[in-house]
Image (tube, rainbow, N blue to C red):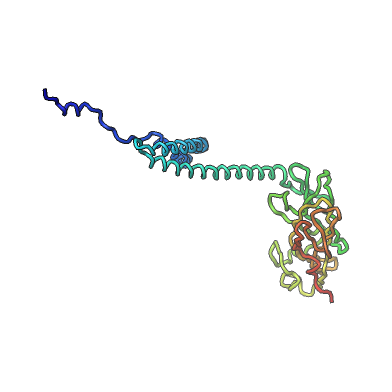
Amino acid sequence: MQMDYRQDAQMAPRSLGPQMYPPCLVGFCLSLVFPVSFIIPMISSAFGLIIFIGSIPLSLAGLIVSIVGVAKCKKPKYYGSGFAIAGIVISILDLAVAIFALIAIALGIALFLYVLSGLTGHAYGDPVAMGQFRVGENRAKDYAMVQSWEWSGDPEDTTIVIPDEDENDAKIVSIGNGGPYYMTGSPFVIVLSDDVVDFTKTEEFAGPEDFYGDFAEDPYKWGVPKGTTVNEEDLIFTIVIGENIESVHITELTDFAIVNDDGSITIYHTYLSFEVSEDNENFYTEDGVLYSSETDKEYKYVSPENYKDEE
């Protein structure tokens, strides 16, 4: 009897060859979720953050699954290692970007809380009068700063003793709105009393409203009537710093042009000198010049070194 070998060949099982290992494709797809999470917030910001955070563990899962896929594809019966390798690379990049983004978000939140605490706790309120000073307290009412000092116009009244506390027993820690207790810088200034006639505030003055310049160079240029007697004097203000002061923020002083009772004008060229309490740990002085105790940095205010040479 003759056997039909063709029929036997048709009945024999066929070899299917290498097969795609599913985890390779799964790992690759999981690695793509994180990049897509950057696009979704552009479409719907409501779910953007949730999807972004949720995609991070998916990227980690994609990395693990892709590593398993690469290992399995070493066997001849599986293929798909290309997808698995791509999944590993993309997942690693995903996780690196995610770590950076989370650090940035954490720093942003910390900065926001710091600013918020400054607005509610450390930022100073509107200054109020306290003798010749204007003093502002922070919102928490436990610190204060001196913003300005009012000069009476008397050449003998030049010693500025910074108080240790304000009228509410808040420690005065700053001269000027500066240092760790401020949100917007506002330097300490010396202003003229309302009882003093400032020529730059009179109708005769021909300069700008916020005049800041060398008035004495040519006072008649700025509207001083011809024939008016104009005198010039150097004036040293001494700032006495107590033990509580932690920061100093002072602008360079401007000259004062004061109209005297007899109609003459005295131009005071103003300078600063400092005295510091021995109990103050933040500052010290040498020859009236202010220095930081921590860095020995000289505070570049108008100091005795800048005084005009006396003839």
Q: Nearer the viewer, residue 296 or 266?
A: 296
In the rendered view of the protein, which quadrant contains the C terminus? bottom right
261 sits left or right of 110 in the view: right
- Residue 221 horizontal/vertical position (percent): 71, 72
Q: Residue furthest bottom?
A: 311
Name the residue at the front extreme.
1
Residue projecting furthest to the left: 1
User: Quick check: 96 above or below 46?
Assistant: below
Nearer to me, 222 or 269: 269
- Residue 90 falls in which quadrant of the image? top left
Q: Residue at x 70, y 42 (%)?
A: 120
Note whether 148 is above or below 156 in the view shown.
above
Residue shown at 58% from the left, 44% from the top: 103
Is residue 30 at all visible to an observer of this figure? no
Residue situated in front as seen by the camera: 68 or 25: 68
- Looking at the image, which is closer to me, 213 or 136? 136
